Amino acid sequence: MYPDVKTLMALLVKEKYISEADGRAAQAASHDSASYIAYLVDNQLLNKPLLGQALAESYGLRFVDLQASPITKDLVEKIPEALARENRVVCVQVTADTIYLVSDSPKHIKPKDIQPLFPDQRLRLRYTLPESIDACFLMYAQTLETRFSKIIDTGHRVAPEIVYEIIKDALRYRASDIHFEPHEDMVNIRFRIDGGLREAGKIPKEYYDNVLNRVKVESGMRIDEHLAAQDGSLRHNSDDGHADLRVSLVPTIEGEKIVMRVLNSYVQDYTLDDIGLSDEHRQKIEKAARSPFGMILTVGPTGSGKTTTLYATLKTLNKPDINITTIEDPVEYRMSGITQIQVREQSNMTFSRGLRAIVRQDPDVILVGEIRDQETAEIAVNAALTGHLLLSTFHANNAAAAIPRLVEMGIEPFLLSSTLEIIIAQRLVRTICSQCRYSVPASQVLAELPTGTASLTKYFSKTDNLYLGKGCQICSNTGYNGRTAVYECIEVTPALQELISRSGAAHEIEQLARAEGEASMFEDGLAKVKAGITTLSEVARVVELPQVKKVKK
């Protein structure tokens, strides 16, 4: 694995891979080795092959770039999985008298455990990066269908083991959602990874009823109900820890469909430095969060990371002398030090009723999971007016459109102008896999974009280069690994307060924001494209592109 930040920086600076100033800048912007390396790579101060070379030299070993020279499943399986994982080692080459191994933890290898596997050959060790080792370990996994067949052949505990294997794979591949989709003869299993659905496996239809009942029992649903939608939650426990999942079930013509949302516990550790904000946007949000009262809104479609942004903001506010209370549906991320309330329609604990109760609990900061109706909006605005800082999400296409929509819900414009501090609009884009990223001329990328994107050419010169991902084992040959957000932050200035008070339209609000220097989501995405974080096609997929002005003849 990677050394700690202090050791890593000392090594890179000493061997002149980076300057001391760049090393300290990366240290200030990071909280662990992974974020330290990400800073250096994203700012083009270092690439992964050079990093691997530097670490290999520190161990007195040669570096093997498994991205440039991928290996086969047969080579990986020459060492049993348990032994390989214990030693963080993989076989990469076999000759008549030598076995070549690579590891990211050379000091932890126990040659006496590995040598008996190759009694007539000597062992030679090389260094490779941790992500390359992890990618090789994925080759040990059998397909879900193969594992399902083995489970079925045993005839014992079929449903629990099938569910366990599906969830285990979803966590391994960083899936955000798991879909169980019943059809006539089979049940398709699909994972949503980095925003896209991928086929994961199939379950024979005759075993699905048992699987379905198992999920219902674990999620606290009624097993005798087959004609109504149900919601629940479950906790998956394994040797690697636990994961919480939110479960939704709906009846279809082929049976009951299950969708599980994987609630990533690591999100509670995110700060405003970790979610893709520019320095300017981060400073605006921090300024709004320091207000003693008022409203911070995040807007965007479902699954655009709004709640993550609010939790990162809460983390800056979470101190012993501040009372923070949330009401959510559901409570997705548990955070110590704050009071979290779950909406329960059955007991009449709605957003509006819960919010009324919270206001009587002496809060300093309130988070409302979503403003869905006029009653909740009115209570939220009143809470923000009466000395509370209120954070919430709202469905709107962009930041400017949120204000007229709230007015249409019945909120008086003069109240909005007095309470709104900042509106944050966002979308998620996939990030380029750092392991297989390569540069290409911008003109080539622009030529391959779909029609209707001609307006983008004016943002690049003929000498500009952009980045793409080739596809590798680490990113499942997609060229992308992970996601980040593109943002637009409209700060409510005195000029904007006046415009809101007289019920300004969305286009007027947007024009004023641009005149005051606020960048659009497209412009924020463009900056991330030029920095090599994401691709132009990803930005074009999720945000509205600037229109080409027609020239009158």
Image (cartoon, grey):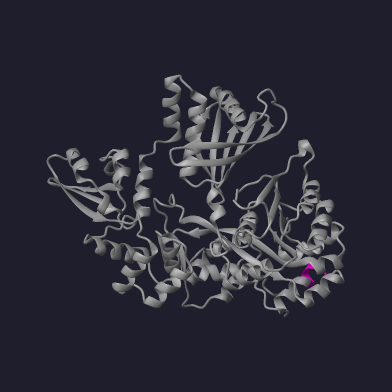
Image quadrant in which the N terminus is located: bottom left
In this view, the residue in front, 147 or 265, is 265
Residue located 21% across and 42% down the image: 114
Check the image and report above or below for 254 versus 103. above
Residue 434 visible within the image: no
In this view, which residue lies farthest toward the front?
Answer: 321
Answer with the quarter of the image where residue 528 lies. bottom right
Residue located 56% across and 23% down the image: 210
Which region is colored magenta? Answer: 504-508
In this view, the residue in front, 278 or 113, is 113
Image quadrant in which the C terminus is located: bottom right
Check the image and report above or below for 298 versus 145. below
- The answer to whether 43 appears left or right of 187 in the picture is left
Residue 541 visible within the image: yes
Question: Where does the image place residue 5, in percent across and percent down from the top left?
Answer: 39, 64
Magenta-colored segment: predominant secondary structure: helix
Check the image and report above or below for 410 versus 446. above
Is residue 302 magenta-colored?
A: no
Residue located 69% across and 56% down the image: 323
In this view, the residue in front, 308 or 327, is 327
Question: Where does the image place residue 105, in percent across and percent down from the top left?
Answer: 29, 53
Residue located 55% across and 64% down the image: 276
